[in-house]
Image: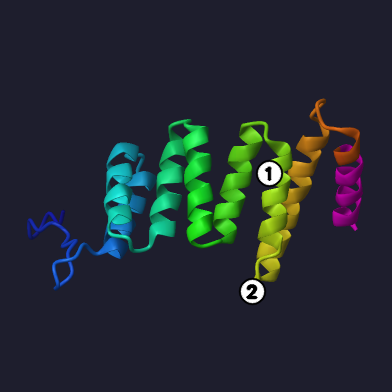
Amino acid sequence: MNESTNETPDFFLPNGALNASLVIIHAETLLKAGDVVLARGLFRKALDTGKLSYLSLFGLARCAEAEGQLKTAQACYEASLLARPRVETFLRLSVVLQQLKQFVEAVQRLREAHALNGLSHVQRLEIKNKRIEALRMALSDMDLSLDLRSQFETELISLRT
C-alpha cells in the first residue's frame, strides 16, 4: 500500500485477469520480510492463474521450507522442476533432500542440474560444490550400499580434480 496516495497495488491486468508477475513480486517481498502466511496466500493466487506456475510453486516451496515443512517443500520444488527446470530450484531441492537424509536423491538431483543447457561457469561451479557436499554427506550415511559407496567415492574424486 502506498502511504502517500492510499492506493493498493493493482494486481489486475486491463482484461481483468490477475497479474501473476506482480502478485509473485509482492509475495517474494512478503516472504523476505518474514510474513510467510501472506506470502503463501499470494503464491497460491498466482498459481491459480495458471501463469508462471514454476515460480509460484518455487515460492510455495520456500514458504513450506521456512515453516519446517520439508516434505511439502520437496513436493513443491519437484512440481516446480516439472514445470520448468531451473538451477536455483535444483539447488534448493538438494538442500531439502539432505535435511530429510535423502542423500542419494540429493546427489541425483544435482547431477540433473549439472546436465542443464546454458549454465554459466559460476552456476557449474556452484553445482559442483553442492555435489561435493552432498556426496560427502551421502558417504557418511551408514546405510549406503557398498556399490553406491564405491560409485560416490569415485565421483567425489573426479569432482575434486
Disc 1 is placed on an element classified as: helix
Measured from the top left, where is residue 101 in percent x and y? 67, 31
Q: Quadrant of the C terminus?
A: bottom right
Measured from the top left, where is residue 149 in percent x and y? 88, 38
Q: Using the rendered view, name the quadrant where residue 94 is placed.
A: top right
Q: Residue at x 66, y 63 (%)?
A: 123
Q: Residue at x 73, y 55 (%)?
A: 111
Separation of residues labelled 1 and 2 (CA atoms): 21 Å
Mark 2, other Cα within 10 Å: few <14 / some 14–19 / many ≥20: few
Q: Residue at x 70, y 69 (%)?
A: 121
Magenta stretch encompasses residue 70: no
Tag 2: amino acid: Gly
SS assignment for the magenta stretch, majority: helix
Disc 2 is placed on an element classified as: loop
Measured from the top left, where is residue 1 in percent x and y? 16, 53
Tag 1: amino acid: Ala
Mark 1, other Cα within 10 Å: few <14 / some 14–19 / many ≥20: many
Measured from the top left, where is residue 60 in percent x and y? 40, 45
Q: Which label sits on residue 118?
A: 2
